[in-house]
Image (spheres, rainbow, N blue to C red):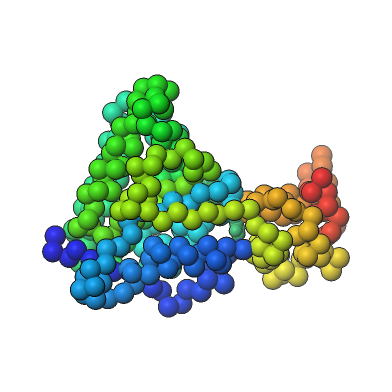
Amino acid sequence: INRPHSNAILRPDFKFADMGIGGLDDEFSVIFRRAFASRVFPPGLVEQMGISHVKGLLLYGPPGTGKTLIARQIGKMLNAREPKIINGPEILNKFVGQSEENVRKMFADAEKEYKQKKEDSDLHIIIFDELDAVCKQRGSGAGGGTGVGDSVVNQLLSKLDGVDQLNNILLIGMTNRKDLIDDALLRPGRLEVHVEISLPDENGRIQILNIHTAKIRAVNKLADDVDLNELARLTKNYSGAEISGLVKAALSYAFTRHTKLGDVTGVSGNPNDVMLKRGDLMKALD
Ligand code: ATP
């Protein structure tokens, strides 16, 4: 291939504020600056300057904090294809030999599609979720003592080392346990940018609550007694996923008020009167 530097197209209509990611502005800007900025530069210039794109990124932090969300949204922003997702534990369940084959195939497919495509904007993001499952320090018999974990890591390493000419592939590893990730994977040229995605602070929780109640507010179904600032204070240590779950649970309480059990008509009162009230959210918090 004589197109060593692919280029991504930054969608001009895409704004961070519209991405539905709350409380991660700083993290997002680090990720973009370190892992993606070079990809939106003209390929010729990037090549002349001897820049090679970052091939891998590690997002680490507690579950449900928006790691997958951020990876997907960045892909959309850059007009990349829908990311391919591999899951650590799932891959280990496959027959011995099958796991490395899956990893190899994932990269091979991306390479093949790249060769067929004419445009330079063809960025492939491969998300490796729960990477720690295959990584538990090599040689320690991860993968139930079968060595499958070792061979998957080896396959990843050889693929990452081999994508020099294929700058259209970006691997995003995700984990709740960075300490378990094999050092060899974290070196420059591999998963070299490491960004911690932590639990949201109060301000972040306000943003996340705003995002997850936006549709409810848009149709005026959020009662006046709901104070999102108060809720943000009460949800200390909640992840984004837990906040989203809280709003969903509260909504189900709101709907329940309009539902008659054991009656075929099912609905009591006017369903259009349904309102998400402070009481529903408090009940969901319990
Ligand atoms: P895991 O480590 O368990 O895979 P994750 O960090 O990848 O978790 P996501 O899958 O991105 O978490 O989050 C799950 C859902 O929780 C998202 O689809 C979204 O609805 C909500 N969510 C999580 N974090 C945020 C956030 N910062 N802003 C808005 N919504 C969020």
Image: 121 above or below 151:
below
Quarter placement of the C terminus: top right
| x 28%, y 48%: residue | 160
Image: 148 above or below 194:
above
Left/right of residue 147 with respect to residue 215 in the rendered view: left
Left/right of residue 61 with respect to residue 2 in the rendered view: right
| x 41%, y 74%: residue | 11
| x 26%, y 45%: residue | 159
Image: 261 above or below 277:
above
How far from the left and from the top, in percent, is residue 83?
Answer: 39, 54
Left/right of residue 174 with respect to residue 148 in the rendered view: right
Q: Is residue 127 visible?
A: no
How far from the left and from the top, in percent, is residue 219?
Answer: 71, 69
Quarter placement of the N terminus: bottom left
In which image quadrant can residue 87 be found? top left
Direction bottom: furthest residue: 12
How far from the left and from the top, in percent, is residue 131?
Answer: 43, 41
Return the residue nearer the eye: 140 or 234. Answer: 140
Left/right of residue 144 with respect to residue 52 in the rendered view: right
Direction left: furthest residue: 2
Image: 194 above or below 214:
above
Return the residue nearer the eye: 121 or 276. Answer: 121
